[in-house]
Image (spheres, rainbow, N blue to C red):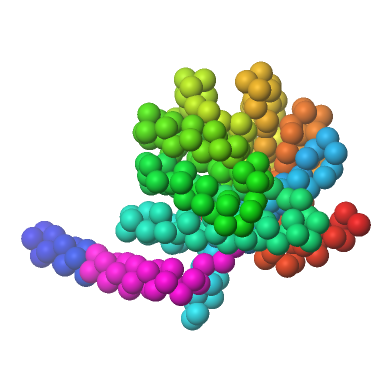
Amino acid sequence: AKNDHRGVAVATGDAADVAGRQRLTTLEELRTGLDRRELTLHYQPQMHLGTGVVTGVEALVRWDHPRRGLIFPDVFLPLAEHAGLMGRLTLQVLDMALEQCRDWRADGLELVVAVNLSASNLQDATMPGHVADALARYDVPPAALHLEITEEILMRDAARATVVLAELRAMGVRLAVDDYGTGYSSLAYLHALPVDDLKLDRAFVTHCDTDPRSAAIVKSTVELAHNLGMRMIAEGVESEAALSRLREWDCDLVQGYHLSRPQPADRLATWLRERQP
Ligand code: C2E
Ligand code: CA
Ligand code: CA
Ligand code: CA
């Protein structure tokens, strides 16, 4: 038993070492990647259900790694957050998104761009100033920028987050609660926080056409949002059936694979032109 125990302990130690070394390499690579501006954005359209018009896009970050190819955010965002790199990362994303937004507008595409914020961004009192600088740099009106904040993050330190959010909103930037329904939902924060849109998590949306419980949640959330003067955005719309239910229930905006997957800016522009001649 003693040997077994030691054996396991040694094996665990080795595994932890390897994992630790890998994490270190990746962290160094991530730092270098940020320095070399290897991050890139894909954009996923958001459509207004009442009119069928694509009114905006969500910017989703990818790491265009020189050797490993395109890496998805789930892999490197936790690392960035853990290593204190999230401030830099968000500023790069914001910069790219607003530059793109400016170019689209110059080409006659009046798109709003939504950028995701992380937990540390909301604890950073300098954040609103950076956002204002970036908007000015690209001469993009604040109303053309939406910021998405997950419910889980909002709940973490609501008092400090509220200060940052209020400042952003006072500038005219629009705020959305992301992944709504997956955190420790509290109606108290919806009541207190200065937010404009509810973005219901795809867990409730994708099967809302077949699953009665999802349907009930979607319908009630639309009502809740509207009663609070907010708009409801449904993410994870993967079928025409779900889309038509959402339209029936008066959902405001939809986003999902059914409409389009996230794609590079040039492909999105082509897609838009073919769709809305
Ligand atoms: P999210 O903000 O909830 O973004 C939506 C995610 O769902 C995206 O994954 C998108 O590709 C995916 N998605 C879109 N439509 C559908 C659909 O119809 N079905 C399904 N199953 N999935 C769909 P992605 O791009 O891998 O991003 C994952 C998460 O990483 C995002 O979730 C967001 O939390 C985070 N993220 C992405 N970009 C950024 C960023 O620039 N900054 C920060 N802080 N977080 C980001
Ligand atoms: Ca989001
Ligand atoms: Ca989401
Ligand atoms: Ca999510």
Q: Residue at x 55, y 35 (%)?
A: 169
Residue 42 inside the magenta-drawn segment: no
Q: For this view, does 199 lie left or right of residue 2?
A: right
Q: Residue at x 62, y 33 (%)?
A: 197
Q: Main secondary structure of the magenta part?
A: helix
The image position of residue 8, as x and y in percent, is: 19, 63
Q: For this view, does 203 lie left or right of residue 81?
A: right
- Image quadrant containing the C terminus: bottom right
Outermost residue toward the bottom in this view? 67
The image position of residue 106, as x and y in percent, is: 75, 59
Q: Residue at x 43, y 68 (%)?
A: 34
The magenta stretch spans which residues?
Answer: 15-41
Q: Quarter of the image holding residue 21?
A: bottom left
Q: Quarter of the image holding residue 101?
A: bottom right
Residue 25 inside the magenta-drawn segment: yes
Outermost residue toward the right in this view? 277
- Image quadrant containing the N terminus: bottom left
The image position of residue 119, as x and y in percent, is: 41, 44
How many numbered marks are there?
0
Up-down: is 264 above or below 194? below
Q: Residue at x 85, y 60 (%)?
A: 273
Q: Nearer the viewer, residue 93 or 171?
A: 171
Q: Nearer the viewer, residue 114 or 65?
A: 114
The image position of residue 102, as x and y in percent, is: 68, 58
Residue 236 can be seen, yes or no: no
